[in-house]
Image (cartoon, rainbow, N blue to C red):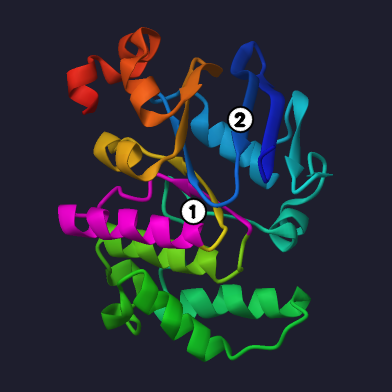
Amino acid sequence: MGLLEIEEVSVQFGGLLAVDDASISVPAGCVTGLIGPNGAGKTTLFNVITGLQAPSGGRVVLDDVEVTRRRPYRRARLGIARTFQRLEAFGSLTARENVLVALEMRRRWATARYDCGKIADELLERVGIAHVAETRVEALPTGSARLVELARALATDPKVLLLDEPSSGLDEQETDALGVLLHELTAGGLAVLLVEHDMPLVMEACSYISVLDFGRVIARGTPREIQADPSVQRAYLGTAKAAS
């Protein structure tokens, strides 16, 4: 049983079935990958999990509590955080101010007291961008802005972290550092659901992977099992060699 359970979720937009009876389990303490071609329904599924999109069917369960009909802010308070495929950081604010916004919001419902400034600095250091703390996000390269989003998501102290293409815009060294960070975060019990097109990162970071194609889960398993699955190779990876 995963900390997050997506159970038989479907999403229909008019005559288009964007997500078709998808079920995914996201355990605590590991990274679960969600891969598939562009338009497969991955971001739509993220929107269902976070409450930005109502499903046509199915349910979302977080830590044994059904949250399918709860508002996004309620889900955030229960422990779901995310980053976005298209950057949603506050461009006119500095990297540090972006993280402080999330910390101040969390303080409204958190029972424990904490020093927002200290935690903001720690999070920026942890994701590797402390050196740009006082730089406006609109002036940062895309990769650094994505790391601001990651730090902001971590500021809410989530149980489940949804990452939508977090390596986009990162160089090779930054991507390697992201992989190390994901292992550190999950070692502390965090559940991570990762949407990513960087296959080396996916295969290295993930313990389990689900594959979406035309809104349906066509395969699930370990990275080795996914690489060897002929249906996955046809739908997305192309060849086993290309995924290695």
Q: Is residue 144 above or below residue 135?
A: above
In the image, what residue type sits under mark 2? Answer: Ile
Q: Is residue 67 above or below residue 209?
A: below
- Residue at point 43% right, 29% down? 222
Quadrant where the C terminus sits is: top left
- Residue at point 50% right, 22% down? 220
- Residue at point 32% right, 9% down? 234
**Of discs 2 and 1, which sits in the foreground?**
2
Say which of 217 and 57 sits in front: 217
Q: Which residue is mark 1?
A: 83
Say which of 243 and 144 sits in front: 243
Left or right, residue 26 beside residue 163: right
Q: Is residue 226 above or below residue 4?
A: above
Q: Dot 1: within a 10 Å radius of its alpha carbon, few (fewer than 14), some, or many (20 or more) residues?
A: many
In the image, what residue type sits under mark 1? Answer: Thr
Q: Is residue 117 above or below residue 217?
A: below
Element marked by disc 2:
strand
Residue 192 in picture, x, y percent from top left: 52, 49
Quadrant where the N terminus sits is: top right
- Residue at point 68% right, 59% down? 79
Residue 106 in picture, x, y percent from top left: 67, 74
Which residues fall within the magenta stretch?
159-187
Is residue 182 found inside the magenta-colored segment of the image?
A: yes
Q: Which residue is mark 2?
A: 24
Residue 17 in picture, x, y percent from top left: 62, 15
Left or right, residue 10 beside residue 155: right
The quarter of the picture where residue 44 lies is: top right
Whether residue 162 appears in this view of the structure is yes
Q: Dot 2: within a 10 Å radius of its alpha carbon, few (fewer than 14), some, or many (20 or more) residues?
A: many
